[in-house]
Image: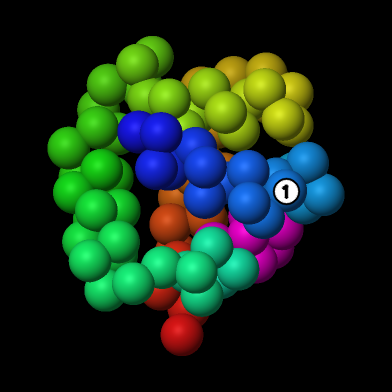
Amino acid sequence: MARATSLILMVEVADYEIQSAGYFQLGCDVGELLSEDDHGFWDNLISAELKETEDLTLCRELNKYNKISSIEETLKALNYFYQGLNCK
């Protein structure tokens, strides 16, 4: 999960607005940094771990940087982010 966290930090999450367009753009920006193998990593992460949201480090990182108050809002943000990863 350090890999996910470091990618998020590389594109400075704090600069993105807490809205769908902001997280989609964040995903696009991160997507440009990823190799094909990394995209497989994200596919596995999303499918395997979204059900365990309390333990999802990425959710915690999004919360920390953007002060999103609920898991539901975090999951929405993560969903837009994930869609953005595949925006190419």
Question: Which is the main secondary structure of the residues drawn in magenta?
Answer: helix
Tell me which residue sits at (34%, 72%) in the image: 35
Task: Find residue 55 and report its horizontal and vertical position in percent.
Answer: 35, 16
Location of residue 68 by image quarter? top right
Q: Is residue 8 left or right of residue 46?
A: right
Task: Find residue 45 and report its horizontal and vertical position in percent.
Answer: 25, 43
Q: Is residue 13 above or below residue 74?
A: below
Tell me which residue sits at (71%, 58%) in the image: 22
Task: Specify start and end residues of the magenta stretch as a single range.
Answer: 19-27
**Disc 1 residue type (three-letter):** Glu
3 in the magenta segment: no
Q: Is residue 2 above or below residue 30?
A: above
Q: Is residue 61 above or below residue 83?
A: above
Tell me which residue sits at (53%, 22%) in the image: 60
Q: Nearer the viewer, residue 84 or 70?
A: 84
Tell me which residue sits at (60%, 33%) in the image: 62
Which colour scheme appears in the figure? rainbow
Disc 1 crowd, CA 10 A, few/some/many (<14, 14-19, 20+): few
Q: Is residue 65 left or right of residue 63?
A: right
Q: Is residue 20 visible from the viewing direction of this image?
A: no
Residue position marked by numbered label 1 in the rendering:
12
The N terminus: image quadrant: top left
Q: Residue furthest bottom?
A: 88
How many numbered callouts?
1
Name the element at disc 1. Answer: loop
Q: Nearer the viewer, residue 60 or 79?
A: 60
Q: Is residue 12 visible from the viewing direction of this image?
A: yes
Q: Is residue 85 left or right of residue 64?
A: left
